[in-house]
Amino acid sequence: MKYWLVAEAYEKIEQTSKRLEMTDYLVDLLKKTPKSAIEKVVYLTQGKLYPDFTGIEIGIAEKLAVKAVAKATGRSEAEIEEDLKNTGDLGETAQKFLEKKRQVTFFPQPLTVERVYETLDKIARASGPGSMDQKINLLAGLLADAKPKEAKYIIRTVTGSLRLGIADMTVLDALAIAYGGGKDSRVILERAYNVSSDLGKVAKNVVEAGIEGLKNFKVSLGEPIRPMAAERLSSPEEILEKLGGRCIAEYKYDGERIQIHKNGGDVILFSRRLENITNQYPDVVSLVRENVVPDKVIMEAECVAVNLETGELRPFQELMHRRRKHGIREAATEYPIALFLFDVLYVDGEDLTVQPYPVRHDVLKKIITRNDRVQIAKYIITDDPKELELFFEEAIENGCEGLVCKSLSESSVYQAGSRGWLWIKYKRDYKSEMTDTVDLVVVGAFHGRGKRAGTYGALLLSAYDAKNDVFPTVCKCGSGFTDEDLEKIPQMMEPYKIPHRHPRVQSKLEADVWFEPKIVLETIGAEITLSPVHTCAMNIIREESGLAIRFPRFTGRYRTDKSAEDATTVEEIIEMYKSQLKTTQT
Ligand code: AMP
């Protein structure tokens, strides 16, 4: 196929801003494209060589492209640079200089799509020493044989500035019209695209097998499935009504969504945007190898930073340490993660995206070995708005963003690539921030794990309820302790150890070790939230809920100057809760 046809289509597409016309031009081009070149043409119209998830980019720096243009046109780099200042588009500059050159030379062999594609592919893959020169030579060779207009688009393609504005959906429309018998067939094409994220592959399939053939298009291991997304509502009542009166509510973890593809020992991880992020999470790769039983699986999880010693979830920001090229292993040790799985889309050849969620959830429960670091997203099945609300508060207090409530109906398939009412998120409509520290009493402790085995992993902390002279709990705190603190605290607490909960301590949690309320620690958190677990201010703000400190952290200050009765009071915590709402509610 002549590249000229592609360049001409680009020119027409570029000159219209109407989507319908754009689609028509694309339809013309796709109809003129032979079967063997259809994938290439589809990728090229989007300025690519492969689907995004492969991570292969043509990307040549403009400076290099200038050298290639100079070489192909027989001009100096300075001349090219000078003209570029005026045009602001190296494509146009290349076109101009080639037009001048063509007046004195013969036209060479016409460029084919195949040759353009293969040369661009070589450019994309060239690496290592000497690759710069290689790239320049390859590009210059192509330009030397190109017509001026072709050169313009080749340059724009290699420098990543093609920008024809052809969206994925426009390509699907054009394919439906050109090869699917009309626009109505787009849903079938769209589904194929949603489960493969590969427009070229979809195009090839519809051209070869027709729209009927495409109905059998299956999920494939290694090709990311476009993620399903959730709608949003703001009350448990509305959510339950929308989901037919009953739903499965899961913690909405605040981490990074990961689509896991396991093929024997090979594990690939895709981000929500379907980039390959396997390198950022060597620990996830090992966890998957060790704890996912079947050979071939596609599943989805939220990857969350955790404190392995206490099991506490950590804020999303800790995952940012993975966004780097070097030192990933160190980051993985310093900021460990856990996986909370929430869907399974494929197991050993079977496409599960067409199965209702209860079926997928059951499969999910069976195929993994659960442990501290590999878990199923915590869930309840309920038809009770009150229960949903309390589960929501618990999720927030435990470091989650809220809940994702999911349909249990027969039709609750995995809707790849779309946002629908089968999943409804329940988040808060405000954000709050805790700016002051509080002084809390140590009333209990939990045994540590991992590096904290043998010492305490977390402490149970209480505020002081002066009216009733009791100590209701307000958080479980496992952060902010230095190694020195961890050594010192058990010794410090030893004299106050008692075999059961102190009668003045109000707690719904069962600590591993209980103390007499004596020692006061200064603590700060991210915010104060409602909590069904902690007893501080129980039933005061809301029935069956107390107040808790989210993401609590020891500041390092032992308030030896304070007795337990001098600790921050319940009233003060209520005031802090109310004032943070006043200042931050939107
Ligand atoms: P949002 O990004 O606010 O639209 O919320 C959807 C996101 O919540 C998903 O993309 C996931 O990353 C995340 N998430 C956390 N926990 C779950 C869960 N249990 N089920 C589905 N999505 C979840």
Image: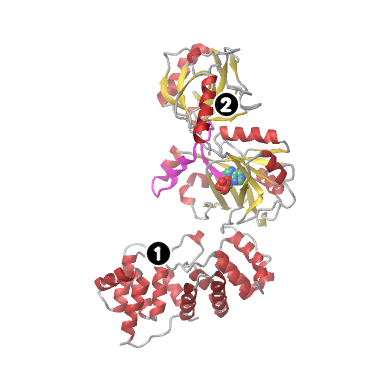
Residue carrying label 1: 59
Judging from the image, the colouring scheme is: secondary structure
**Lower position in the chain sequence, tag 1 or tag 2:** 1
Dividing the picture into quadrants, the one containing residue 177 is: bottom right
Residue carrying label 2: 547
At numbered mark 2, what does the secondary structure look like: helix, strand or loop?
strand
Say whether residue 321 is magenta.
yes
Which one is in front, 437 or 365? 437
Q: Give the label, 1 or 2, closer to the camera.
A: 2
**Disc 2 residue type (three-letter):** Leu
**Disc 1 residue type (three-letter):** Gly
Q: Is mark 1 within 8 Å of ligand 1?
A: no
Q: Residue 307 appears at what percent x and percent y?
A: 50, 34
- On screen, residue 387 above or below 267: above
Say whether residue 388 is magenta.
no
Q: Which mark is residue 110?
A: none
Q: Residue 432 appears at what percent x and percent y?
A: 50, 34
- On screen, residue 87 above or below 509: below
**Residue at the (31%, 82%) spot, across then down:** 100
Magenta span of residues: 301-330
Q: Residue 184 appears at what percent x and percent y?
A: 67, 69
Q: Residue 126 appears at what percent x and percent y?
A: 38, 66
**Residue at the (35%, 64%) spot, across then down:** 61
- On screen, residue 346 above or below 501: below
Which one is in front, 448 or 522? 522
Which one is in front, 534 or 131? 534
**Residue at the (37%, 72%) spot, across then down:** 91
